């Protein structure tokens, strides 16, 4: 045990003291914040280009003339121009600023599907939506007049219902609907686990390969057993990853605290007390309700589960990746063995995005318990409070899966770490698994 601890200490301090680790740990949250801030700034600062449309109106009552009044940004309609389609097409290509021709055929009112847009420059998604909305508005006004329906009556019929969704607790009290926040939290946590498992698992594999190709391992093996070396390397790098994650979480929390202190110092506390009365809304979501929902999430369970499933998933997959690193001589030889290991991880991420629609369904339950997929899938379910027995069973099977994968990896590791010049195959790995010798 002391030998493993010494290896853990060596692996941990060797990597933590690297300049690259310190720089990325300190700058990671800042770079992510700058990246997303830049995206937001670009989306806000970018000017909407003008999309100019010539309107060819063949209707007897000039339906197209009403298109001049539109709220679509960057969209300009030119109406009242004489000519046929051939003349309009020629004009569109002669005038550089003109992008398209919108055609209202003779019987456009009776057959709205006959209206079409012929473009020189493909319209953006926003322009497509604006043009469609403008044409629909013209048709709507004409139909209201034809059927003699007052605009006020139509507006009352069409009025949108903003029905609130609330969680009805057993006590009879109502609670704000936080399903969207829990969905984002579950998917985000699952993605982080996926990213960290790959990041630090591959670090283990490359570390093993580096020691093997440099022949350093021959010296190390003379003092420690292969299994001890493998476990020490896996646990040491796991602590490196956990250290980096904790620092990132603290720095991110500090950044959020600074922003909160600058813009809304008392908002969170008021939300906790249920006294926040602000009606500032973004996209129809009340800011006070959002803060109250975030404050009402059991963060101790979320963070504790994240740490467990991150460590469990990492230990399970990194032991297998360590075995791959010991079995090959070059990184190019790892591809044939990486696919069976990376597929369950990728599948877990994809399945999480789908089962989030039904977190308590049979597929969600199965994949959140199966050890190869449970680190990501169960973490995606945790915010929705799955039954305790499922969580405990998932944790127990993940631990069993780790011990099983470690046993298999240890068998491969002890033989492969000293093999040189021979390309490993699946048949060779199977032989190493059942090879009897000192570990």
Image (tube, rainbow, N blue to C red):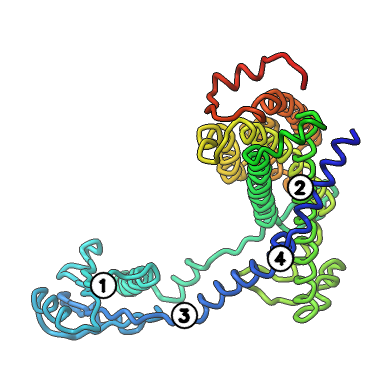
Q: Earlier in the sequence, mark 1 or mark 3?
A: 3
In the image, is residue 362 above or below residue 13?
Answer: above
In the image, is residue 6 above or below residue 369?
Answer: below
SS at circle 2: helix
Task: Indicate which label's residue lies in the foreground, 2 or 1.
Answer: 2
SS at circle 3: loop
In this orientation, which residue lies closer to the viewer: 229 or 222? 222
Residue 401: x and y in percent read 73, 28
Q: Earlier in the sequence, mark 4 or mark 1?
A: 4
Residue 130: x and y in percent read 37, 73
Residue beneath the point at 91% across and 36% down: 2
Cα–Cα gap, marks 2 and 1: 49 Å
Residue behind mark 1 = 121
Q: Earlier in the sequence, mark 2 or mark 3?
A: 3
Residue behind mark 2 = 306
Cα–Cα gap, marks 3 and 4: 32 Å
Q: Earlier in the sequence, mark 3 or mark 4?
A: 4
Numbered badge on residue 355 = none
The quarter in which the N terminus is drawn is: top right
Q: Quadrant of residue 76?
A: bottom left
Residue behind mark 3 = 46
SS at circle 1: loop
The quarter in which the C terminus is drawn is: top right
In the image, is residue 206 above or below residue 89?
Answer: above
Cα–Cα gap, marks 1 and 3: 19 Å
Whether residue 359 is visible: no
Whether residue 429 is visible: yes
């Amino acid at each position: 045990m002391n030998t493993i601890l010494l290896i853990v200490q060596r692996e941990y301090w060797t990597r933590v003291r690297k300049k690259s680790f310190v720089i990325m740990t300190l700058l990671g949250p800042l770079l992510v914040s700058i990246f997303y801030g830049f995206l937001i700034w670009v989306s806000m600062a970018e000017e909407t280009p003008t999309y100019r449309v010539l309107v060819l109106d063949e209707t007897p009552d000039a339906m197209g003339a009403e298109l001049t009044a539109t709220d679509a940004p960057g969209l300009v309609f030119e109406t009242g121009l004489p000519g046929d389609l051939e003349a309009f097409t020629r004009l569109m290509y002669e005038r550089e600023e003109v992008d398209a021709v919108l055609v209202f055929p003779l019987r456009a009112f009776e057959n709205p599907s006959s209206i079409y847009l012929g473009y020189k420059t493909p319209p953006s998604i926003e322009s497509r939506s604006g043009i469609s909305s403008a044409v629909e508005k013209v048709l709507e006004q004409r139909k209201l007049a034809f059927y003699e329906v007052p605009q006020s009556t139509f507006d009352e019929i069409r009025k949108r219902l903003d029905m609130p969704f609330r969680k009805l607790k057993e006590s009879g009290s109502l609670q704000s609907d936080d399903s969207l926040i829990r969905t984002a939290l579950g998917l985000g946590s699952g993605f982080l686990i996926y990213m960290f498992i790959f990041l630090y698992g591959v670090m283990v594999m490359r570390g093993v390969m580096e020691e093997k190709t440099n022949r350093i391992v021959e010296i190390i093996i003379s003092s420690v057993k292969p299994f001890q070396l493998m476990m020490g390397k896996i646990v040491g790098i796991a602590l490196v990853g956990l250290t980096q994650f904790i620092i990132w979480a603290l720095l991110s929390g500090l950044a959020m605290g600074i922003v909160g202190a600058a813009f809304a110092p008392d908002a969170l506390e008021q939300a906790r007390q249920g006294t926040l009365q602000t009606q500032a809304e973004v996209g129809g979501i009340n800011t006070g309700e959002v803060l109250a929902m975030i404050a009402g999430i059991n963060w101790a369970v979320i963070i504790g589960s994240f740490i467990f499933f991150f460590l469990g998933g990492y230990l399970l997959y990194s032991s297998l990746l360590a075995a791959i690193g010991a079995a090959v001589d070059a990184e190019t030889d790892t591809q044939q063995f990486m696919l069976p290991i990376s597929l369950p991880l990728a599948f877990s991420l994809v399945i999480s995005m789908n089962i989030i629609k039904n977190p308590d369904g049979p597929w969600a339950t199965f994949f959140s318990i199966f050890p190869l997929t449970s680190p990501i899938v169960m973490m995606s379910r945790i915010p929705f409070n799955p039954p305790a027995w499922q969580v405990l069973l998932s944790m127990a099977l993940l631990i069993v899966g780790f011990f099983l994968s470690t046993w298999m990896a240890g068998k491969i590791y002890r033989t492969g770490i000293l093999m040189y010049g021979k390309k490993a195959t699946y048949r060779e790995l199977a032989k190493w698994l059942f090879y009897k010798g000192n570990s």
